[in-house]
Amino acid sequence: MTPKLVATDMSPGGLLKTLPKWEQISRRDQMVIERATKNIGEALADLGRSKLAIGEHLTEVQEKLEPLRLFNRYLKALRFKKSTAYTHITAFKNASAHLPEPVLRRAMFRNMSIVGDAEEKPLGKYTNAFKRLPPPNTEDTHKIDQYLDMIEEAALKSDARSKKYVKETVQKDPAYLKKQLYKIAKRCISQLPETGNRRRDMEQRGEFIEDVMGMLLSELGISRKTIEAQAVPEDFKVGPGRPRKEEETAA
């Protein structure tokens, strides 16, 4: 179930007291800021809950219609992209399975992006931090805030290390660069205008590719070579939230 908000979730708690010169602000202004912060928290939590709620409701419909091979037709009727629907479903299942409800509620209040649709990162960029620091079994808002502070700090350090690794290692890997170049080229080719004649469109795409390859070969001082078609590796094609093939066929 999508988590329900309770009164303690909406309290700014000790967060505002960490602000420099907070004690120098008049009590009247403090009350205005506290009230506004509470309202902001409610709006952020509602936003987070709505994302999970969409996944929860889609899951309910999926359970009823998928056995009848009608779920994709249902999505089409709602003008709902399949990839987006599966992303919401997976994010809901991941968040519900990995976090206690009090922690999940407070994380949404703090506008933490803790929803993820990838199997290896079920809680988005915070996945590794949550694995290293298991959530506490408590409903105490102050203790949960302290825990989430540690999670954000751990995720920030991990993100910095990951970016450094990608920059120094991954981005220099020929296999990685080949995959990125393939994706960029495919995206550019998909934007070429179509004539309505399939054969002519294929010829134009071929000419486009030959022109680009010819310029690259010339720029690099490489003699003209014959380039043959080859199969695209599966990991070049797979993206997050992709529905199963039998589902696509049913649509």
Image (cartoon, rainbow, N blue to C red):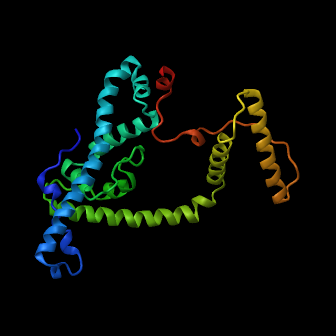
Q: In percent of the image, x 16 and y 63: which residue is there?
A: 35
Q: Is residue 14 visible?
A: no
Image quadrant in which the N terminus is located? top left
Q: In percent of the image, x 31 and y 57: which residue is there?
A: 112
Residue 128 horizontal side relative to residue 35, left or right: right
Can you give x and y, in whole percent of width and height, for residue 128 in the image?
A: 37, 56
Q: In percent of the image, x 62 and y 46: which residue is there?
A: 183
Can you give x and y, in whole percent of width and height, for residue 248 in the image?
A: 50, 26
Q: Is residue 196 visible?
A: yes
Specify the quadrant of the image occupied by residue 206.
top right
Could you say which is closer to the camera, residue 132 or residue 127?
A: 127
Query: On screen, 186 above or below 33?
Result: above
Residue 33 horizontal side relative to residue 231, left or right: left
Residue 102 horizontal side relative to residue 75, left or right: left
Number of disc labels? 0
Specify the quadrant of the image occupied by residue 202.
top right
> Which residue is farthest right?
223
Can you give x and y, in whole percent of width and height, for residue 81 in the image?
A: 45, 34
Specify the quadrant of the image occupied by residue 166.
bottom right
Q: In percent of the image, x 37 and y 40: which residue is there?
A: 88
Can you give x and y, in whole percent of width and height, for residue 241 in the image?
A: 45, 38
Could you say which is closer to the camera, residue 221 or residue 71?
A: 71
